[in-house]
Image (cartoon, rainbow, N blue to C red):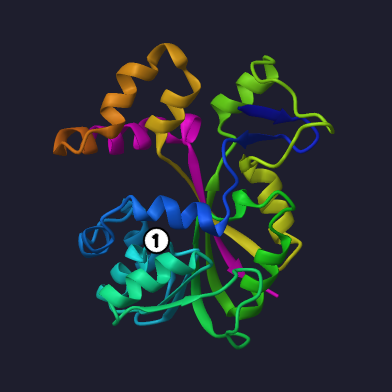
């Protein structure tokens, strides 16, 4: 169920609460060693990391899941760390790949020293907290060095979703809505950018991606056709998905990445 929160210009998705147990269950369905050793991540992670983070710098993946981004960062020559509160998943990955620097920690309250990291990747984390992401951002600011880079990715209110909201295509969120099964918000990136500016981060870049998912989830009459393309592992299908992101990402992207620099 997806409801529109008109006050905060965001969508609220209710499926199953995104607890640590939920993520442990999700990751158990994956072949973790194959997932990590494949070296596959979103195409922009390597490009943005090498463009904005210092060569060989210390980087954190906060909410690292099965650790594939940590593994890739390590292969690219960075001093990479990963944290997640899904304890069973972290333990399983550490047993299979003990060379990865992974630990069970809460992204709101880590045990790292002040100004410890040159950069911080947060991929699809902040949208899963009903009470907001202020503590996550505050902690990211604390552990980043002055001038450090915060790569912040989250499910976004794309122009397509914003248009649908204006056309009243979503039921409204009400104070009486049961939030027990809250899964995620789809956030307004302009609001997030303004709030992070107030917490000492300056925006350097915005990049919307996963345009195909943004299309198939919002246009039911195309869902069946696009779902097959979305799930396909065929090389041509992957290329087409990337092409869609390049051509349509700014209008239909399911996710966005904000590249932010710590300024204060």
Horizontal side of residue 144 vs 210, given as left or right? right
Horizontal side of residue 88 vs 108, given as left or right? left
The one nearer the camera, 99 or 126, is: 99
Is residue 41 among the parts visible in the rendering?
A: yes
* Residue reaching furthest to the bottom: 113
Q: Residue at x 76, y 38 (%)?
A: 8
User: What secondary structure is found at the residue carrying circle 1?
Assistant: helix
Magenta region: 240-264
Q: Residue at x 81, y 34 (%)?
A: 7
Q: Residue at x 30, y 52 (%)?
A: 30
Is residue 258 among the parts visible in the rendering?
A: no
Q: Looking at the figure, which quarter contains the N terminus?
A: top right
Q: Is residue 252 magenta?
A: yes
The one nearer the camera, 239 or 61, is: 61
Q: Is residue 203 magenta?
A: no
* Residue reaching furthest to the right: 175
Q: Position of residue 201 (x, y in %)?
A: 65, 65
With respect to residue 262, does 13 lie above or below? above
Q: Position of residue 150 (x, y in %)?
A: 54, 66
Q: Residue at x 50, y 22 (%)?
A: 218
Q: Position of residue 234 (x, y in %)?
A: 16, 36
Q: Which residue in the structure is indicated by mark 1? A: 48
* Residue reaching furthest to the left: 235
């Amino acid at each position: 169920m997806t409801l529109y929160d008109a006050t905060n210009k965001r969508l609220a998705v209710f499926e199953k609460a995104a607890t640590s147990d939920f993520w442990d269950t999700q990751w158990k369905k994956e072949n973790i060693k194959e997932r990590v050793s494949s070296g596959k991540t979103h195409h922009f992670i390597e490009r943005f990391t090498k463009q904005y983070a210092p060569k060989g710098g210390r980087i954190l993946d906060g909410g690292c899941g099965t650790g594939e981004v940590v593994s890739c960062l390590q292969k690219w020559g960075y001093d990479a760390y990963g944290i997640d509160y899904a304890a069973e998943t972290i333990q399983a990955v550490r047993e299979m790949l003990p060379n990865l620097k992974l630990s069970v920690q809460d992204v709101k309250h880590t045990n790292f020293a002040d100004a410890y990291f040159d950069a911080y990747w947060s991929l699809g984390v902040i949208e899963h907290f009903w009470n907001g992401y202020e503590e996550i951002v505050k902690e990211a600011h604390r552990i980043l060095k002055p001038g450090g880079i915060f790569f912040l990715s989250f499910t976004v209110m794309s122009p397509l979703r914003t248009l649908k909201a204006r056309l009243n295509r979503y039921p409204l969120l009400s104070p009486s809505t049961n939030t027990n099964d809250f899964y995620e918000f789809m956030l307004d990136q302009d609001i997030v950018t303004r709030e992070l500016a107030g917490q000492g981060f300056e925006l350097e870049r915005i990049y919307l991606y996963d345009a195909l998912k943004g299309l198939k989830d919002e246009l039911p009459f195309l869902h069946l056709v696009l779902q097959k393309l979305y799930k396909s592992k065929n090389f041509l299908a992957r290329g087409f998905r990337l092409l869609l992101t390049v051509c349509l990402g700014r209008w239909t992207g399911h996710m966005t990445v904000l590249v932010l620099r710590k300024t204060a």
